[in-house]
Image (cartoon, rainbow, N blue to C red):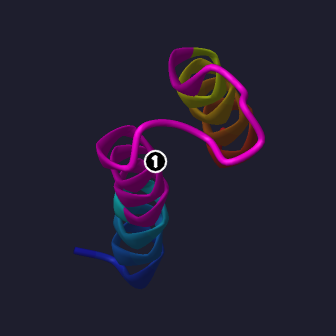
Amino acid sequence: MSPRVVRLVVVLRSARHGVATLEAGGGSPLGADVEERSTRLVEFLDRGLR
């Protein structure tokens, strides 16, 4: 696996871990919908990784 692919996997895993942590803790401390934030995060990463 190339170093770039490894970095991308780490970024994606870290992002997903953050969402899972929010979900496990009952949601965002700012009151935002976790599902909406998760969707926005995926869209943001998708645009950034292209």
35 vs 41: above or below: above
23 on left or right of 47: left
Amino acid residing under circle 1: Leu
Q: Is residue 8 above or below residue 22?
A: below
Where is mark 1, residue-wise? Answer: 22
Q: Nearer the viewer, residue 29 or 6?
A: 29
Horizontal relation, residue 26 to residue 35: left or right: left
Q: Position of residue 16 (x, y in %)?
A: 39, 49
Q: Residues within 10 Å of mark 1 (few under 14, many from 20)?
A: some
Q: In the shown orientation, is residue 37 left or right of residue 20?
A: right
The residue positioned 64% from the left and 35% from the top of the image is: 41
**Element under label 1?**
helix
Residue 14, image x, y percentages:
43, 65
Q: Residue furthest left?
A: 1
Compared with residue 30, is residue 1 higher up or lower down, i.e. above or below?
below
In which image quadrant can residue 33 be found?
Answer: top right
| Residue at the farthest bottom position | 3
The image quadrant where one finds the N terminus is: bottom left
Residue 47 horizontal/vertical position (percent): 73, 32
Q: How many marks?
A: 1
In which image quadrant can residue 45 be found? top right
Q: Nearer the viewer, residue 31 or 38?
A: 31
Q: Residue at x 46, y 57 (%)?
A: 18
Residue 31 falls within the magenta-colored stretch = yes
Span colored in magenta: 14-35
Residue 7: image location, x then y, percent: 45, 75
Instruction: Decide whether residue 29 is among the magenta residues.
Output: yes
Q: Quadrant of the C terminus?
A: top right
Residue drawn at the location 46% of the way across and 47% of the way down: 22
Identify the residue shown where x is 61% and y is 41%.
Answer: 28
